[in-house]
Image (cartoon, rainbow, N blue to C red):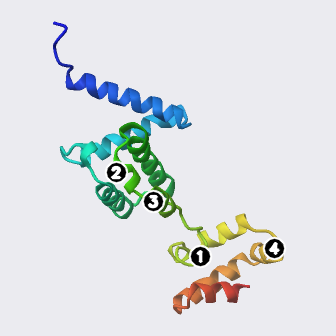
Amino acid sequence: MPNTPPRASDAAARFFDNYLSLLAKNGIPERQRRWYVRHVEAFIKEQKGRRIRSLSGADIEAYLDVLGRERCLPGWQFSQRIAAIRILYRDLLRTPASDAVDWQYWLDSARELDADHPTTARQLSPEELSYIKERRSDGPLNEVRTAHRDLLLRFTSEIRRRGYAYRTEQNYEQ
């Protein structure tokens, strides 16, 4: 029976073997490779039977957009998923879709803002923000923060109760 066609499971096994070897060539640590495979499996499953070779760059970007908006992933996990799909398309499949996707844009969008960035700082309680500031900085202001922690927490809570902007909170604290 040398002329029997290969089974689908054999083809899938070869596909993922090739993908794993590409992960190694791209310097992905061995302990992380299984996650890359899982990300690609999730991507393929999300296509609901559409052949991944036939997807356009817009299809891939639409998937990344949904992934970034709806899954609430930390930046490093989103970056890892982007890298998994990029390696799949750029190195394994080598389809024109790979060139149509702005991979750097997606990797840049995966970066997280600092905890004390004005956009995200208000999501933290005054206690959490104070702890982060104390751990990150040094100098005279940090000495004041440490010595008068309770006073600054009450002060920050009052500023927030009054609805002042975060930049105002920062300036008043200084």
Q: Which residue is mark 4?
A: 143
Which residue: 40% across, 52% down? 99
Tag 1–tag 2 contact (CB < 8 Å): no
Disc 2 crowd rating (10 Å Cα; few below 14, some 14-19, many 20+) is some
Spatial CA distance of label 1 from label 2 is: 46 Å
**Quadrant (top left, top right, bottom left, bottom right) of the N terminus:** top left
Badge 1 element = helix
- How far is the residue under mark 1 from the one under mark 4? 17 Å
Which amino acid, by three-letter code, is at mark 4?
Glu
Mark 1 or mark 2: whose residue is earlier in sequence: 2
| In-image side of 74 versus 1 (left or right) | right
Q: Nearer the viewer, mark 1 or mark 3?
A: 3
Task: Give the structural element (helix, strand or loop) at label 3.
Answer: helix
Residue type at mark 2 is Ala
Q: Quadrant of residue 2?
A: top left
State the residue position of label 3: 106
Which residue is under mark 1? 126
- Quadrant where the C terminus lies? bottom right
Disc 4 is placed on an element classified as helix
* Label 3–label 2 contact, CB within 8 A: no
Disc 1 vs disc 2: which is toward the camera?
2
Q: Nearer the viewer, residue 107 or 169?
A: 107
Dot 1 or dot 3: first in sequence order is: 3
- Which residue is disc 2 drawn over? 97
Residue 158 lies, with reference to residue 76, above or below; the image says: below
